[in-house]
Amino acid sequence: MTHSDHHRHCLILRGTRQQLLSEFLYLSRALKTPLICSQHLDQYDQLNQGRYKTCNFKQARQLLGSTQEAVLIDLTQGVSASALAILAGTVRGGGLFALGLPNGNWHDYLDQDLSRYLPWPHQHEQVHSYFKDYLWSRLQDASSPFNESVEPQAPLIALPVWPPNITLTSQQQQAQNQLFKLDADHYILTAARGRGKSTMLGDTLAKLSQSSLNLALVAPNQDAIGTLKAQFEQSLKQQESSAKWPFYAADALLADPQHWDVLIVDEAAMFPIPMLIELAKRAKHCVFSTTNYGYEGIGKGFGMRFTKHLKQLKSRSQQGVVYLTLEQPIRWGKNDPLEAWLNNTFFLGGDMANESPSETAIESLQYQTLSAKDWLQHPSQLSQAFQLLANAHYQTSADNLRWMLDDPSLSIHTLNHESGLLSLAIVSAEGGLPDSLSQAVMEGKRRPRGHLMPQSLLAHEGFAEAGQLNFWRISRIATQPSQHNLGYGSQLLENVEQSAPPECDFLCTSFAATPDVLHFWLKNGYRIVRLGTSKDHASGSYSIMLVKPLNQSANTISTSWQTRFIEKFTVNLMLQYHDLPSDLVLQILAGNHGEIGLPSLALLNPQEKSELALFIDHHKPFDSIRPTFLKACYQLAISQQLDAKNPSHLLMLEAALGRNLSDNQKKAQLDGKKAIYQTFKSLLKVKIGG
């Protein structure tokens, strides 16, 4: 490899920790502070005398956005796919990326990181890691950039130090010129790692700071924008000018009443979409920068979902949304072998090919069930499956690949056409917990790995029988984006149901509750049994759990669970779900509750019916019947007489719950309280009677 390649140097080092450290430090002695990442750091920290930095696998994520010159990942005690992918993306051209392996057969050594992927009662010393098989095969592949020294005692030549790139490329300059125009409400800047997003944004921010514009920068944390800040300061120095570093934590900016001219949000996909929507409202022009696929585990679902929300906002400028992208690598040279290897190994590069016709007859599709071991025999299918997950889900990381290969409770179900994969479901077998363990989970004393559904029903809902039951949880399901709404997902769920073993009591699922996704599961016969009490950080939505009974006993049990859920939900709506969207509230209230009857909060006694009649037919004040009106709305919603897409119906629910009426009042074209109350009277008269 010549210097002009500006590629990274990739090595496999062998030996004890002491030997790995000695050889790595020798190799990187001419490079800036080397970094060592390992499952456990005790020995490295004891030997350190300020010669290197350290981080464990969990801390690797904090280094996103940084630039390193030499990195050693010690794989002797465990393998973190995400740490490997993240840190490889931080190493600049001419730098060193080394993997440390033990002497002898790597597979003979226990992998302590494997336990993260194993549900109870599996132990890491009892399970074979197919991911390690896969990774080793990729390291040995002809395309692998890694070289292994067969003579470690031979003298090693230190690697060269490369000067930083301080001038913008033509591609960066073009993107910057677009930003300088400020003729769009929102700019979405996407690129793979190492393309110079941070450098370009730092320079742009410095130049804009010399104007009278009110600027702000938001990022998940300041550690993740070290390169951006360094370029900001360097550009100011070159301009012989000064400006305040305009960084704000997202919460602090949203709490600040002022309005911004330009807001830059770096690593935007690491924020919940609802927070991004609020940020978008706080500035005249917003720049959202993120990777279009990535080591941080964001998936392309972010871009699709977020863009959909942005397009719904009222445009303030000449253009609504402008897309910018950077393709030329900056941190390393073109055609870098390590980047190509990473993309191929972790399926990070490019979109999934879609050669299927717009609609394929369901009866012509092939259904297939695969285990983790099968993936190694079908690498092309593994590639299609993982890229489908990355395109469909908000969060998909390299760790998910290890999960798919190493969790023995998983089965993978696919619908295929002759041209490729159409739909995919990953199913996790859960439950069958001993009574003593179930009791400990209910008491909050135990939290065994895995078994999400029975643990949640035990610990949060107090359903004592949930632990002993057997569940098949659909943990992921995805269909090619161009093939949505053609019935493939529903067909796949039907196939999964037919494949469930006789001892399985329930199919089940848990996901971030949004109206479109909830509609899909309700349509397929799943019943709501739990709604989380806090929002998921990634999606900004509450998690919701649904089950589908597979036998008569399970049907009886799920009915009792539904009854308990709807009783609690009608109370909790007034206590803790003030920010749950009204259309979603109506969906949940109406969701497959036909068999369970009405909860007490939805039962109207004769006196309350008389009160409603006085409001409907006469002049009884609305405020005097608020509790009764709430009961009536609950009754109508649970009996599926209110439509979540009807503004007038949503207005009724919002009035009953004491919510803001303005949005749906405008949609319903109602002017003033008199018109609103008359609409309520008409709806109540038709649906309940007066």
Image: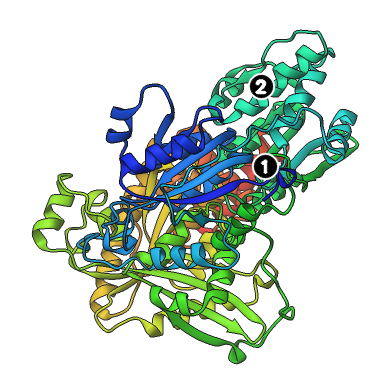
The residue at the far front in this view is 154
Badge 1 element: loop
Residue designated by label 1: 194
Query: Looking at the image, which residue sits at the far bottom?
Result: 364
Locate residue 469, reporting x and y percent.
22, 69
Is residue 659 left or right of 483 when viewed as pictured?
left
Q: Residues within 10 Å of mark 1 (few under 14, many from 20)?
A: many
Please report the residue visible at 40 percent of the width from the left and 61 percent of the height from the top. 403
Q: Position of residue 320 (x, y in %)?
A: 83, 41
Q: Is residue 346 above or below residue 361?
A: above
Locate residue 241: give its quadrant: top right
Badge 2: residue crowd in 10 Å (few <14, some 14–19, many ≥20)? some
Q: Which residue is mark 2?
A: 230
Residue 476 image offset from top left, x and y in percent: 47, 64
Q: Residue at x 30, y 46 (%)?
A: 16
Above or below, comparing residue 109 to residue 4 in the picture? below
